[in-house]
Image (cartoon, rainbow, N blue to C red):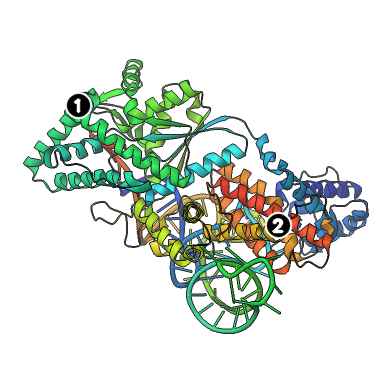
Amino acid sequence: MDEFAETIVALIAARLQALGVAPVPEIPPGKIERPPDAALGDYAFPCFLLAKALRKAPPQIAAELAAGLREGLAGQALFTDVQAAGPYVNFRVSTAALAARVLPAVLDGSYFQANLAGSGRKVMVEYSQPNTHKAFHVGHMRNVALGDALARILAYNGDQVVAANYIGDSGTHIAKCLWYYQRHRAGDPPPPGRGPFAAQARGEWLGELYTAATLLLEDAAPEQRAQFDAEVRAVLQQLEARSGEAYALWRETRQWSLDAFEEIYRWLDARFDHVFYESDMELGRQIVDEGLRKGVFVRSQGAVGIDFGEELSFFLVLKADGTTLYSTKDLALAQIKFERFGIEESIYVVGAEQTLHFKQVFATLERLGYPQAHRCRHVAYALVMLPEGKMSSRAGNVILFSRLREALDAYIFGNYLDAHRGDWDEAELRETARRLAVAGIRYGMVKQDPTRQITFNLGDWLVSEGNTGTYLCYAYTRIMSVGRMVPEAPDPRADFALLTQDTEKALLRELYDFNRHVRAAGAALQPNLVAGALYALAQAFSSAYHTSPVKQADNAPLRAARLALFHATARVMHQGLALLGITPPERM
RNA sequence: GCACACGUAGCUCAGGCGGAUAGAGCACUGGUCUUCGAAACCAGGUGUCGCAGGUUCGAGUCCUGCCGUGUGCGCCA
């Protein structure tokens, strides 16, 4: 917790007692604020909270409290000043005390263990959920960035996290793709593809077939459409029965998509502890049968579902033709998570358009008697749009992963890394470009509130200044550069009282507050809070970097203090970026 | 039609549980590299916080209505 805020609460309580106030009102440490301007102080106590109990005007309370508190300052080391400012009592903390509470802990690593005292509950974070036989585009990247960051943040906060993927390798969309292939492209080989992203060509080719199938079906005349639908249904039934020509074709083409996904995850540094496949969820049919017997589900118009009345309406779990639905499989997956994985809390990172669906799934799980139904949470995020509107395969305006990656690569080399050719070896150049591209994408996807749409303008994502992943990496590499110029090891026992610059204190404060931001991000399931904290940290560092030279510091003790400060900053930056799935390069 | 989410500076966005003069980035104008990396820093100004009511000591934040945008609402996922 925040030792400074807690001490303030204790000091005020003691002061009130001394003034004869009884009973002393409870003040939660969370009510201690941060003044809008550091010139006012570092912590603020709003006296409105006491106005009722003391029956006095807040400014008067502030003045009286401040006067008394100032006298008690001599006996302690945390605060150097207390001032009343209108209805607030502002506290200035001792820079040395602040530094002593954060720098040694960061340098010995214990700072990064502090949040581990969290719940320890077993949490599954399910994310990515790409569909095979469809192309992977920028919209899918937002999901990966969010889900992966969430998994890392929760683990940092002490949860036992299982990161899970759930691949959509069955269902109508695949039947359509394979139907089209059999009908129009039978025997056509996929494009070969080369290099480290060889599988993208095949994955994207399948996506094109799917799009072509959709167009053909949509544009068909009614009679022909009926025939097409019957053919697609026949394919789907072969897939569910796991036999026939379509099934063999499915096995082969499915692997193409899986290979393509694997390349993308490797490039992104996204990892999963477990991968579920939709095609393994036949168990869903049994759940429906049992539910029917128990009277949880009912038959309706030939199909099976559950009626939630007005609020959640009717939830379909089996089609009239007997084939399963997305919902059927989601019930099966939930059961597997609970029973086979012992999951206590289940988090689903899925687009906001499925909010109703998940409310229905969770409500159904409750009716089926799963106590964990109350610990299921849907992390809804809004779509990634293009400036001209929604991405649509039909209009041909999706930005594919491969195109985005290539554009970033070209930008990074053309503007920066080409200058290092000959100097750095090829492997480092390529790895640096990858890390910067990943930082740009992941940070851009995660820095914003998940509920807000992202308007994706490729040009904007090629920018490397301002509030970007590149900026954060740049801050980190500058510290690494300082470390190369001043190769001494950072000294956790340096004299931190020498850090007298405002910028140095501001940087210390960001370091001190970092863990609290990560805790808040985990509690709210909002990685953007970590992104914001990192950005503030990088800004504070950049300012301090300009005011506080290390190598040219006036004397050796000051140099040691600054070196420790900057090294600690680098450690926190590195850890914070890791929580977002970003590894900064050592130089760029 | 009903439900959910979102309307903050020219643009893209922040604004922990209601609190001080609503903040960043981009863009624009100046300044700062013989001294640890200028992908940076410093200094400039811009707001009917969608509109109208309400709650309270205090509302960008909470409540109600309206307007706008997006998404969803039984055999897609």
Identify the image quadrant of the N terminus of chain A: top right
Residue type pointed to by label 1? Gln
Residue A57 in view? no
Label drawn at residue A527: none
Between A254 and B23, the residue placed more toward the observer is A254
The residue under the point 38% across, 57% down is A406
Q: Nearer the viewer, residue A350 or A584?
A: A584
The residue indicated by pointer 1 is A238
From the viewer's perspective, tell me whether residue A444 is left or right of residue A166: right
Which residue corresponds to the image point at 70% horizontal and 59% vertical from the top-left?
A: A507
Q: Please indicate whether residue A434 sits to the left or right of residue A385 in the image.
A: right
Q: Which residue is mark 2?
A: A566
The residues bearing labels 2 and 1 have C-alpha atoms spaced at a distance of 62 Å
Callout 1: few (<14), some (14-19), or many (20+) C-alpha neighbours within 10 Å? Answer: some
Amino acid carrying label 2: it is: Phe
Query: Number of labelled discs?
Result: 2
